[in-house]
């Protein structure tokens, strides 16, 4: 029985022709009728009106064209999901897939791209679906190659091994390095624009396939006709001559210091300063024909700072063992701080050194997976998910590299390290009191925010 006091409260009757037992339109609170839409929401149901803005805006500012590229291959809704996951992985260090939806709601990514469903199950199905549709990934990569690789583009190709602890996918295999450590790996090969450091395309391979097989397949699939493969000391170029026979695809790799080539070609005696490189680098160049009749070019460098360190280390070891031999020391001394590279390409000496440095910059691209993005191991289990997850990591890496490049353009003005910039950006928050959430303002303001 409804109390008389409640029945006497004024309220709408049969509003808008609704039946007596229609939907709830309001409540009687403290003897007064209150419309439903005027009632305060429970905290658990309220919108987040205080969101992380800085790094999300920075990442989206450099990466939003990737969304257009995704839409050329995938459905618009799927494209937004893929891009938002990649964006959030680049914004939030170490974010796990099950945390993506929370970070989406708490950051301005949800304002830039509202209404994107990113629950754990959605992301799991998304990653698996990406891997099942390998043609989509391949088409996306081919589109980037067509767009980015023009005449004069210096394409560098390198690879990485990534730990794969799963036991239920066929990508897992023991590479040479992995076998020594007892760890199964997957292999990822990248093409990178040497000027922008931006990855162009990538592909995942089994960890136990020979390097030259992977590289040949990679070049053929993405129709890369010119480029330079940056190999390590074990790169088996002698087993892959067909890949390099036209002279358009080259390789460069370091030699072991005991190879004897530098002495044979008298490279140590012919060293001179290498132009425009900090004034402490010496270099020389030589060539000879191999047993196969192909010309090999050798590039020898000596870094003054590294030479001093190796010289000092040698002296310390000899003193500790009380076994200094001056004649032996003089033989070794000329090799301190040196590195010799071999290539099938006739390159400028100063360019080779830049490639040498760039090889380590490419390693930074790889470290974007391991440290910046905190993707240290493959969490997903089946082949589909490995391919799908690495594709999204690829997009995240592009965004990360672009942010680093933008920082390099402005580092003198900012007078901060990149990590400091990231920290400051993470502190930039926007809030709103607008019921429609259209007007947002800084949660607090600093002088640095203007620069950012």
Image: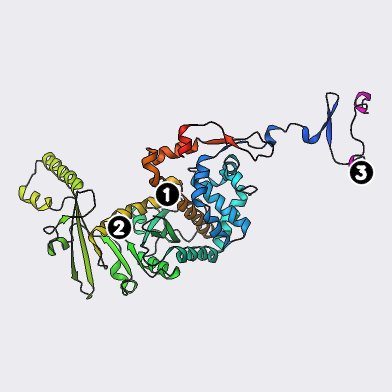
Dot 3, crowdedness within 10 Å: few (<14), some or many (≥20)? few
- Percent across and percent down for residue 15 are 90, 39
Which one is in front in this view, the residue at disc 1 or the one at disc 2? 2
Compared with 38, 380 (above or below) is below
Report which quarter residue 110 is drawn in. Answer: top right
Please tell me the numbered disc located at residue 368: 1
Residue 105 on the magenta span:
no
Locate residue 185 relative to residue 286 in the image: left or right.
right
Circle 2: element type: helix
The residue carrying mark 3 is 17
Vertical relation: 166 (above or below) 150: above
**Mark 1 to mark 2 CA distance (whole Å):** 19 Å
Residue 253 x/y as whole percent: 27, 61
The image position of residue 234, as x and y in percent, is 29, 61
Which residues make up the magenta segment? 1-19
Going from N to C along the chain, the mark reached first, 2 or 3, is 3
């Amino acid at each position: 029985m409804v109390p008389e006091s409640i029945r006497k409260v004024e309220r709408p009757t049969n509003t808008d022709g609704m039946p007596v037992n229609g939907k709830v339109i309001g409540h009687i609170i403290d003897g007064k009728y209150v419309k439903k839409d005027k009632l305060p929401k429970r905290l658990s149901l309220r919108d987040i009106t205080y969101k992380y803005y800085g790094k999300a805006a920075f990442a989206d500012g450099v990466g939003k064209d990737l969304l257009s590229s995704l839409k050329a291959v995938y459905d618009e809704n799927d494209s937004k999901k893929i891009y938002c996951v990649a964006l959030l992985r680049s914004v939030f260090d170490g974010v796990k897939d099950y945390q993506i939806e929370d970070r989406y709601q708490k950051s301005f990514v949800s304002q830039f791209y509202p209404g994107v469903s990113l629950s754990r199950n959605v992301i799991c199905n998304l990653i698996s679906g990406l891997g099942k549709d390998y043609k989509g990934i391949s088409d996306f990569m081919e589109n980037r190659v067509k767009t980015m690789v023009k005449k004069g583009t210096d394409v560098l190709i390198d690879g990485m091994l990534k730990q794969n602890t799963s036991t239920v996918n066929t990508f897992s295999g023991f590479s040479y390095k992995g076998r020594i450590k007892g760890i199964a790996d997957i292999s990822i090969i990248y093409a990178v624009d040497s000027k922008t450091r931006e990855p162009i395309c990538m592909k995942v391979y089994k960890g136990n396939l020979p390097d030259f097989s992977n590289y040949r397949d990679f070049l053929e699939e993405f129709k890369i006709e010119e480029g330079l493969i940056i190999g390590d000391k074990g790169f088996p170029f002698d087993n892959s001559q067909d890949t390099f026979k036209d002279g358009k695809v080259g390789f460069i790799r370091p030699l072991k210091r005991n190879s004897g080539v530098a002495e044979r070609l008298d490279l140590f005696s012919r060293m001179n300063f290498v132009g425009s490189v900090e004034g402490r680098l010496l270099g020389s160049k030589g060539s000879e024909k191999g047993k196969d009749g192909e010309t090999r070019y050798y590039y020898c460098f000596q870094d003054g700072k590294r030479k001093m360190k190796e010289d000092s280390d040698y002296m310390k070891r000899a003193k500790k063992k009380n076994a200094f031999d001056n004649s032996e020391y003089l033989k070794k001394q000329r090799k301190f701080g040196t590195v010799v590279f071999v290539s099938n390409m006739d390159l400028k000496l100063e360019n080779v050194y830049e490639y040498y440095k760039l090889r380590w910059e490419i390693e930074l691209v790889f470290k974007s997976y391991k440290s910046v993005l905190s993707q240290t191991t493959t969490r997903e289990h089946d082949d589909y998910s490995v391919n799908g997850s690495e594709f999204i990591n690829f997009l995240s890496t592009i965004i990360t590299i672009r942010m680093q490049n933008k920082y390099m353009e402005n580092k003198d003005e900012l007078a901060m390290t990149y990590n400091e910039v990231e920290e400051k950006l993470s502190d930039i928050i926007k809030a709103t009191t607008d019921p429609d959430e259209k007007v947002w303002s800084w949660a607090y303001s600093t002088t640095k925010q203007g620069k950012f």
